[in-house]
C-alpha cells in the first residue's frame, strides 16, 4: 500500500476534474464514499474554484447524512480532492502525480480532459491532436509505468460523424468528420489496441457522451466555460442572465429533415452522465457483477464502448422553448445558413449501457433546464462570482 492510501478508499485519478463534466464526476465519486479523488487539470477551460465547491458540497452532505454521529476519518478523506494544476502534455508533471501514490497506488483513471470544440478543431487541428491524442498516449504510458491499467475514457457521439441511422447503436462504423471527432476515434483505437495487446493487464471502458446539460440541483456546481459558450444550452443561459449584449440566437438551418426543420440532439442531465462513470468504474472491478456483464462477450481484450444518452431527440426550437419556460426570458432567434459539419439528428441507442451497466438517464429536459438556470442565476459570472 502506498503512503498516500486511505484504508477503504480506492485512489482514482480524474483528468479534467475541474471542468463541467469532470466536476460532476468528482462529486458523484465522492458521494459513494468509496473513492479518494486525485485531479489533474491545467485550467485551460476551468477554474480551481470548481473543485473547492465540490469538496465543500460533499462535506456538507456527508455531515448531514451522518448527523448526529461524526463522519469517520475515511469518509472525511473521501470528500477531499487532491487537486493538481498540471498539463497532461507535460509527462514530467503527470509522472510526479503518479509518483506521489507509488506503483499500484492509483487504482484507476477517468480520463476526461480534452479540447472539445468541433469548429475550433478544424482551424487548429495540430493543437487538438497534441492535446487530445498525444496527451492520452503519454498518460497511458505513465499509467503502465505505475501499474495502473484501468481506464474510463470520455468519448463522444461525434465519433459517429453522420450516422447512417438514428438511434445510433455502438456497432455503427466510426467515421468522425472533424479533427475533434477523429481525436476521439484515435484514442478509442489506441486504448482498444492496448487492451488487446495485454488482455491480462488492461481493462477499459469508453463512454460516448451525447449532449450533457444541466447542473447539480444545489446550484453550487455547473458549467462555466471560458468565453462565449459554444453549446446551445449554456449559451441560452448566458443570454438569460445578461452576459451577452444584444442577445440574438442564430439558428443554423431550419430546412433539415426533422420535425421542425432544426437540428435534433440527445440531451441528458450531467448528473445522469456522471453516474455512468460510477457504473463504468464498477465494471472495471475484477469479480464484480458489472465486470462479468460488460466483458462477457469480449474476445479481443477487455475494451468496451457504451453510448450515454437518453435515446430521445430534442430540436433547437424545443430547447429554446424549454429554456424560455425555465428562465422567463424572451429569446430572439434568427435563422441563418447551415453550419459546416452539422448533422440533422444525433440520437443515442442507449440499450447496451442500460442492459450491461444498468445505466439510465432519468432526468427530463425540464429538470435539465431548471437546474441549469438555478446554477446560472446563482452564479451569473460562473465560479468568479
Ligand atoms: N460537453 C459536451 O457536450 C461533451 C460531449 C461529448 C464529449 N465530451 C467530452 O467530455 C470531456 C469533458 O468535457 P467538458 O464539457 O467537461 O469540457 P470542459 O472544458 O469543461 O472540461 C475539460 C477539462 O479538461 C481540462 N484540460 C484540457 N486539456 C488539458 C490538459 N492538456 N491537461 C490538463 N487538463 C486539461 C480543461 O481545463 C477542463 O477543465 C471532453 O473529453 C469532451 O471531449 C463533452
Image (cartoon, rainbow, N blue to C red):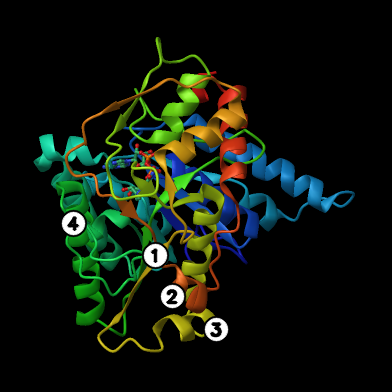
Which residue is located at x 47 percent, y 86 percent?
Answer: 292
Mark 1 or mark 3: whose residue is earlier in sequence: 3
Circle 2 is placed at which residue position?
Answer: 352
For disc 1, the neighbor class at 10 Å (few under 14, some 14 to 19, many from 20) is many
Mark 4 or mark 1: whose residue is earlier in sequence: 4
Which residue is located at x 24 percent, y 65 percent?
Answer: 188
Q: Is residue 137 left or right of residue 49?
A: left
Q: Secondary structure at mark 3?
A: helix
Q: Nearer the viewer, residue 51 or 321?
A: 321
Circle 3 is placed at which residue position?
Answer: 289
Q: Disc 2, disc 1: CB below 8 Å?
A: yes
Between the residue at mark 2 and the residue at mark 4, the CA separation in whole angstroms equals 21 Å
Mark 2 or mark 3: whose residue is earlier in sequence: 3
Circle 1 is placed at which residue position?
Answer: 307
Instruction: Locate residue 7: give its quadrant.
Output: bottom right
Mark 2 or mark 4: whose residue is earlier in sequence: 4
Q: Nearer the viewer, residue 194 or 123?
A: 123
Mark 4 or mark 3: whose residue is earlier in sequence: 4
Can residue 89 be seen from the camera position used here?
A: yes
Mark 2 or mark 1: whose residue is earlier in sequence: 1
Between the residue at mark 4 and the residue at mark 1, the CA separation in whole angstroms equals 15 Å
Image quadrant, ligand 1: top left
Amino acid at each position: 500500500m502506498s503512503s498516500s492510501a486511505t484504508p477503504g478508499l480506492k485512489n482514482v485519478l480524474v483528468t479534467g476534474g475541474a471542468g463541467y463534466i469532470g466536476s460532476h464526476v468528482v462529486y458523484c465519486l465522492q458521494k459513494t464514499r468509496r473513492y479518494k479523488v486525485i485531479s489533474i487539470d491545467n485550467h485551460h477551460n476551468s477554474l480551481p474554484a470548481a473543485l473547492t465547491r465540490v469538496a465543500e458540497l460533499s462535506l456538507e452532505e456527508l455531515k448531514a447524512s451522518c448527523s448526529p454521529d461524526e463522519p469517520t476519518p475515511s469518509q472525511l478523506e473521501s470528500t477531499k480532492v487532491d487537486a493538481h494544476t498540471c498539463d497532461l502534455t507535460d509527462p514530467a508533471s503527470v509522472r510526479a502525480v503518479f509518483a506521489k501514490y507509488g506503483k499500484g497506488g492509483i487504482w484507476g483513471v477517468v480520463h476526461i480532459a480534452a479540447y472539445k470544440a468541433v469548429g475550433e478543431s478544424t482551424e487548429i487541428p495540430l493543437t487538438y491532436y497534441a492535446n487530445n491524442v498525444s496527451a492520452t498516449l503519454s498518460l497511458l504510458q505513465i499509467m503502465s509505468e505505475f501499474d495502473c491499467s484501468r481506464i474510463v475514457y470520455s468519448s463522444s457521439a461525434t465519433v459517429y460523424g453522420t450516422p447512417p441511422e438514428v438511434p445510433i447503436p455502438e456497432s455503427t462504423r466510426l467515421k468522425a468528420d472533424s479533427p475533434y471527432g477523429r481525436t476521439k476515434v484515435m484514442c478509442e483505437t489506441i486504448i482498444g489496441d492496448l487492451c488487446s495487446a495485454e488482455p491480462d493487464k488492461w481493462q477499459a471502458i469508453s463512454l460516448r457522451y451525447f449532449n450533457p446539460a444541466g447542473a447539480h440541483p444545489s446550484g453550487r456546481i455547473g458549467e462555466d466555460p471560458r468565453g462565449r459558450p459554444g453549446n446551445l444550452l449554456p449559451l441560452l443561459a448566458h443570454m438569460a442572465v445578461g452576459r451577452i449584449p444584444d442577445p440574438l440566437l442564430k439558428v443554423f438551418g431550419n430546412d433539415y429533415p426533422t420535425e421542425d426543420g432544426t437540428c435534433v440532439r440527445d440531451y441528458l442531465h450531467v448528473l445522469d452522465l456522471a453516474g455512468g462513470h460510477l457504473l463504468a468504474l464498477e465494471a472495471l472491478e475484477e469479480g464484480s457483477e458489472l465486470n462479468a456483464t460488460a466483458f462477457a462477450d469480449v474476445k479481443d481484450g477487455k475494451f468496451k464502448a457504451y453510448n450515454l444518452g437518453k435515446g430521445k431527440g430534442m430540436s433547437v426550437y424545443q430547447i429554446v422553448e424549454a429554456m424560455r419556460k425555465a428562465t422567463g426570458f424572451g429569446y430572439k432567434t434568427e435563422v441563418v445558413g447551415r453550419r459546416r459539419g452539422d448533422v440533422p439528428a444525433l440520437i443515442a441507442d442507449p440499450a447496451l449501457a442500460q442492459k450491461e451497466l444498468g445505466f439510465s438517464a432519468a432526468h427530463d429536459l425540464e429538470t435539465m433546464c431548471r437546474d441549469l438556470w438555478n446554477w446560472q442565476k446563482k452564479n451569473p459570472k460562473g465560479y468568479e462570482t
